[in-house]
Image (cartoon, rainbow, N blue to C red):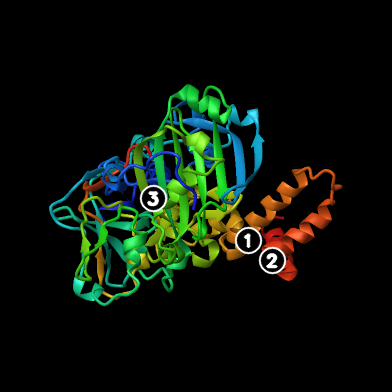
């Protein structure tokens, strides 16, 4: 008999949701975290979309450690001297059941793990899982940790061990490794008085702002973000790995460049750096997905590369929580039916395919590549902002040229071929339409 | 290039804003012999913690202590065997607080 029913590796949002489901189903579950507390190794680019939590913790908003509710969502397209912003706000998002929230991950992840413990899961922190155990048939049968006598056996291991998932790699669930599938996220948490943040970002109380930016990463492909916490703001970048090194611009220099932009400087000025942080993001979507299940093992969250980086939609914590929840359900089902082979665990893939987790990824399969393409990164921001500049510029005594003429002239000036524009437009429509 | 309207802090002060519980053994080991004839040296640019420093004799100096454990270095490295990458012992390494 194994020591426990399920070992969940990693107490991030995926791991804790898996543990909550399993513990509530009466399974003996151990949740192993390498940090001193859940969330201590985690950072992100700013917004938790918590709808999936409704299924696990009713009225979670009454207790979750939230900084602000995002009621204002902006997408900014910029060049070194121009910025074009689409700014949306909804007061409905500042009231239950809410749409998106900013939170510090060390707070949020620890809170979610508390729910796993309350449900009966055993949380073991400060313990690094160093490998998988296998039985005589080659099925995963447990884990090895860095504790003395640190082997633990289980019917199922759910690997929620993050973007680097050495467990998934050890098990051979990832195909050929390609650094181009990853971006580096770097971030500064800047302290500003709450009333200054409220004034600069045009919000009150616990209402908050999330600004996503394209065209702000110099010669590197990626994007930027600024969002509000209660008395800090976070400003950061995601940077596509291969080009980052080639451009010879260090991550913190690129952040400094963004903070100095005329559209950004007035928002961040005087903010004292409270914390600098970095993390990798699995950014390539469905094309990089590993095999999600093996004999005795499931992958969830970043370990499964379930992160949605689709330009206007940038999500990860929700995919982690949902995949963790479905992994927990599938593992409980497999244990009940006494078949934890890859066939017995097939309920996981079925659940992911039936819900947003894989439906969104399939629909948006072209989006990550499009958003990080050279044209979208380096030509379209100049194109879009110069079209806007000419539309709003008053050139009296010259008459207004008309939008069509401006678009045609600017396209030519920036050097975008008509067929490339049509191709990208079609790819965009197929993804986002 | 956009000029910053205010002075940026030194890298020491920047990395000093993050907390690290340093273990006495290194979780990442860099084999300088493999790095010696590397011409791209992408780790020097890409590591967000600036842990890879070129030396005057053409080598690379590496220090594991203030590491975010992100994985960027081994991902951009194109030299087999140059970087041996593991997580720190449980409970050690970076401890994020307001991230």
Which one is in front, A147 or A153?
Answer: A147
Identify whether A267 is placed above or below A407: above
Which one is earlier in the sequence, the residue at label 2 or at label 1? 1
Q: Chain of mark 2?
A: A
Give me the residue at 69% from left, 66% from top: A416
Relative placement, left or right, of A215 versus A141 is: right
Q: Which mark is residue A379?
A: 1
Q: Residue at x 20, y 53 (%)?
A: B89
Identify residue for label 3: A252
**Discs 3, 2 touching: Cβ within 8 Å:** no
Residue drawn at the location 66% of the way across and 37% of the way down: A88
Question: Is A181 drawn above or below residue B16 in the view shown?
Answer: below
User: Could you give the CA–CA distance between mark 3 and mark 2, rounded to whole angstroms?
Assistant: 31 Å
Q: How far apart in space, not on screen, are marks 1 and 3 (Cα)?
A: 24 Å
Q: Secondary structure at mark 1?
A: helix
Displayed quadrant of residue A123: top left
Q: Position of residue A72 (x, y in %)?
A: 60, 34
Look at the numbered discs 2 and 1 and tell me whether their residues touch, using CB distance below 8 Å. yes
- Quadrant assignment, res A344: bottom left
- Using residue A113 as the reference point, say whether residue A227 is left or right of it: right
Residue that sits furthest to the bottom in the current view: B37
Do dots 3 and 2 share one subunit? yes
Q: Which chain hosts label 1?
A: A
Q: Can you identify the residue that label 2 sits on?
A: A416
Q: Quadrant of the C terminus of chain A?
A: bottom right
Going from the N terminus, do you reach mark 3 or mark 2 first?
3
Q: CA distance from mark 2 to mark 1?
A: 7 Å
Residue A407 location in percent, x, y? 77, 57
Is the residue A202 above or below the residue A337 in the image? above
Nearer to me, A225 or A152: A225
């Amino acid at each position: 008999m194994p020591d426990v029913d399920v070992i969940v590796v990693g107490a991030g949002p995926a791991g804790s949701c898996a543990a909550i489901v399993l513990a509530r189903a009466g399974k003996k579950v151990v949740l192993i975290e390498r940090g001193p507390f859940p969330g201590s190794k985690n950072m992100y680019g700013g917004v938790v979309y918590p709808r999936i939590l409704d299924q696990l913790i009713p009225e979670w908003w009454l207790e979750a450690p939230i900084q602000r509710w995002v009621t204002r969502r902006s997408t900014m397209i910029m060049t070194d001297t121009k910025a074009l912003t689409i700014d949306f706000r909804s007061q409905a998002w500042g009231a239950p059941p809410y749409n998106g929230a900013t939170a510090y991950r060390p707070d949020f992840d620890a809170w979610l793990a508390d729910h796993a413990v309350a449900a009966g899961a055993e949380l073991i922190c400060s313990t690094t899982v160093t490998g998988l155990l296998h039985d005589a048939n080659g099925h995963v049968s447990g884990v090895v940790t860095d504790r003395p006598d640190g082997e633990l056996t289980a019917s199922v291991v759910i690997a929620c061990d993050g973007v680097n998932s050495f467990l998934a790699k050890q098990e051979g669930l990832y195909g050929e490794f390609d650094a181009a599938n990853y971006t580096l996220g770097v971030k500064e948490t800047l302290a500003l008085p709450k009333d200054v943040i409220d004034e600069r970002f045009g919000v009150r109380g616990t209402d908050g702002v999330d600004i996503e930016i394209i065209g702000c990463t110099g010669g590197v492909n990626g994007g930027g973000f600024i969002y509000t916490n209660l008395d800090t703001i976070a400003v950061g970048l995601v940077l596509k790995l291969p080009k980052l090194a080639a451009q010879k611009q260090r991550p913190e220099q690129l952040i400094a460049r963004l903070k100095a932009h005329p559209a950004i400087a007035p928002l961040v000025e005087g903010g004292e750096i409270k914390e600098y942080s970095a993390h990798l993001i699995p950014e390539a979507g469905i094309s990089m997905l590993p095999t999600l299940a093996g004999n005795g093992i499931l992958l969830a969250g970043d370990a499964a590369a379930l992160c949605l980086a689709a330009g206007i939609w940038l999500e990860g914590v929700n995919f982690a929580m949902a995949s963790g929840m479905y992994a927990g359900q599938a593992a409980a089902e497999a244990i009940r039916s006494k078949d934890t082979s890859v066939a017995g665990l097939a309920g996981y893939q079925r659940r992911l395919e039936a819900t947003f987790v894989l439906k969104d990824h399939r629909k948006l399969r072209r989006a990550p590549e499009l958003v990080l393409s050279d044209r979208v990164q380096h030509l379209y921001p100049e194109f879009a902002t110069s079209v806007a500049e000419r539309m709003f510029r008053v050139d009296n005594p010259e008459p207004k040229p008309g939008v069509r003429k401006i678009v045609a002239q600017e396209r030519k000036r920036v050097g975008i071929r008509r067929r490339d524009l049509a191709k990208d437009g079609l790819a965009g429509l197929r993804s986002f339409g | 290039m956009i000029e910053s309207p205010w002075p940026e802090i030194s890298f020491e002060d920047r990395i000093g804003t993050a907390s690290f519980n340093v273990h006495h053994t290194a979780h990442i080991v860099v084999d300088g012999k493999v790095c010696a004839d590397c011409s791209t040296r992408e780790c020097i640019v890409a590591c967000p913690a600036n842990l890879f420093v070129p030396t005057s004799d053409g080598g690379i100096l590496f220090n594991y202590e203030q590491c975010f454990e992100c994985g960027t270095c081994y991902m951009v490295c194109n030299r087999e065997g140059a970087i041996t990458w593991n997580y720190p012992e449980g409970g050690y390494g970076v401890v994020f607080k307001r991230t």
